[in-house]
Amino acid sequence: MATAIGRGLERDQPVELQAVGHKPRRLLLNRIFLYALLTLIALFFIVPMIIVLSTSFKLQEEVFTDPGLIPRDPGLENYQQLLSGNAPFFRWFLNSAIVATLGTALTVLLTSLSAYAFARIDFRFKGVLFSLLIATLLLPAVMFLVPQSVLIAQMGLYDQLPAFMLPHLAGVFGVFFMRQFFLGIPVELEEAAYVDGANRLKTFWSVILPLAGPAIATLSVITFLAFWNDYLWPLVVCQQNCTLPPGLRTLQGQFTAEYGLLMAGAVVAAVPVLIVYILAQRWIVQSVTSSGVKG
Amino acid sequence: MTAATSTAGSAGRARRKAVRTDVRRRIGERRITPYLFIAPHLILFAIFILYPFFLGIWISFHRIRGFGTEGPFVGLGTYERLFNRFNFPEFANTLWNTILFVGMSTPLLIVIALFLANLLNQRFRGRSFFRSVYFVPWTLSVAVVGLTWWWMFNGGGPIPQVLNSVFGGTPNWLGSNPWAWITILIATLWWTIGFNTIILLAGMQAIAVDLYEAAAIDGANKWQQFRHITLPALRPVLLLVITLQIIASFQLMGQPQIITGGDPAPNETTPVMLHIFNVGFTGTNPDRSMAAAMALIVAAIMLVVSVVNFRFFSSERS
């Protein structure tokens, strides 16, 4: 089924009929109605973000007295308080950045290596192992929450950076995803390198990985988003040394009514992923349509 | 499910038939080579997924409280406690809340996504711009989404302010039902509708244009085209989206935690995931075993729902 989806995305052509027997006047009215509707819906998605951004520039006393979309007296006080205050906000931001970048790099490397073997080399127990990996994809995440957190505590990693990454690095989706891509690369390309005396690792590194650019880009972007946005998992394994999403929850508990400050926190957490979205939108859309992943 | 197809292109797919995916061991290659390739990931997999799978069951058969990792064996004791008259009502209540949310959100998020995808599946300028805009919130963390809508519907926040000045009154969105549920539904819709829309849109674009042309010549209107061409052709994609939606809705946790805090009391908008979190990870003496037991029961329910869902759709097809 996803093949069909992928095909549709590639063509990326709207399938509308040239209005058969429609009069031009009616067509124009249709267009106006269409754009009005599209814009109205777009506002539903955009306006809350603008409100959050606008609130973040208002002082606590201005939040209720100045309800306008454009602040009368915008200021960066909330951001200053966040980044300099006693709340370890800056630490959370740094943690999120480290976890997301390092986690993404490691995920791509680990899953590509494994996927290459599953795609290209014959070995004993290959079928069994691959089925085992895929089977865990079907298991609901909720059943791992308690045991994984107990395991992290057993390892003494509670409230430490590796705790946010390790269970995700063990995730299976990347192996499945990269293997599918490697299967589509002609073996002949590798054989040329092999004839030249390259071993498997060299072939993988200098022939396969460069060819897998689009797949790596797609996997990287969705993995980055997943790490950066992860909420529930870090929430159960951190107390002080958190990442941004559970940190925002802590802030909400600490500064219950300081809306400007809280919205500034939300903006800081949102801006990096929005930048990634603008730059790498193509890969995100592709990953969603080609595999139906839910971040 | 074929990343290769969508990335390498249709030419790649055509080529793939002819491609040998050579998997033989090469001459002179050591037997251990493939295992070295899979080892780094497989070791992590064994420690952080395979072991916790059994550890979860083990924990539910022991009595582990507080922040320890050990406790006495109690057999089915935890499950007995879960089903006693002190603990069961809360579990049943929150499980019911989750089922309620699945029931409310799934039709809403499918029907509206179908509408949006159909709207975007036309030829007009700025199509990909609107598609991008509708998808933006999906890239945000639930923490950001939660804070956004918590503020939007907050007592003195933007929406009550507007309602007050226009109608002279506003419901207590976050503290009374059905408004608290409506708030959670709107936040979820805002956050995830773009995901469903994009998958459905891609599915619609894969439908042959000739079908629509033929139907139009026969005098079928837009609705008839949608009903008799788009929907039937979209069936496999719809199955995928509905299944993913049910699973996602089952996981509801962050939105009520941040937006309503589970209110109105007593726990009227607390889903079972939040209840598991509250029991297993909050307070001075969290009950890990109880949380693990509840999680296993919820996971079993989710598995059954997924299987039934697939069965239902594939049998309806034939």
Image (cartoon, rainbow, N blue to C red):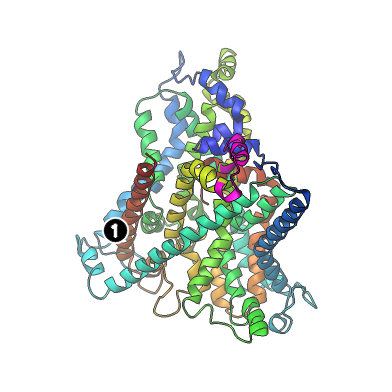
Where is residue B169 shown, x and y percent of the image?
A: 60, 86
Q: Residue furthest right?
A: A73
Specify whether residue A122 is painted magenta.
Answer: no
Specify whether residue B206 is painted magenta.
Answer: yes
Where is residue B87 shown, x and y percent of the image?
A: 28, 72
Residue under the image location 22 percent in, 72 percent down: B84
Q: Which residue is mark 1?
A: B59
Determine the image quadrant of residue A181: top right
Q: Which residues are magenta?
A: B204-224
> Residue B125 versus residue A153: which sits nearer the camera?
B125
Residue under the image location 23 percent in, 75 percent down: B85
Please identify the dominant SS of the magenta region: helix
On screen, residue A238 versus residue A47, left or right, reads left
Q: Type of residue at label 1?
A: Ile
> Residue B41 versus residue B23: which sits nearer the camera?
B23
> Residue B263 versus residue B52: which sits nearer the camera?
B263
Residue under the image location 51 percent in, 60 percent down: A231
On screen, residue A211 versus residue A292, left or right, reads right
Determine the image quadrant of residue B142: bottom right
Query: Is residue A112 visible in the rendered structure shown here?
Result: no
Chain under label 1?
B
Q: Label 1: state its secondary structure.
A: helix
On screen, residue A237 versus residue B293, left or right, reads right
- Vertical placement of A15 versus B76: above or below? above
Where is residue B80 shown, x and y percent of the image?
A: 21, 66
- Vertical placement of A163 versus B268: above or below? above
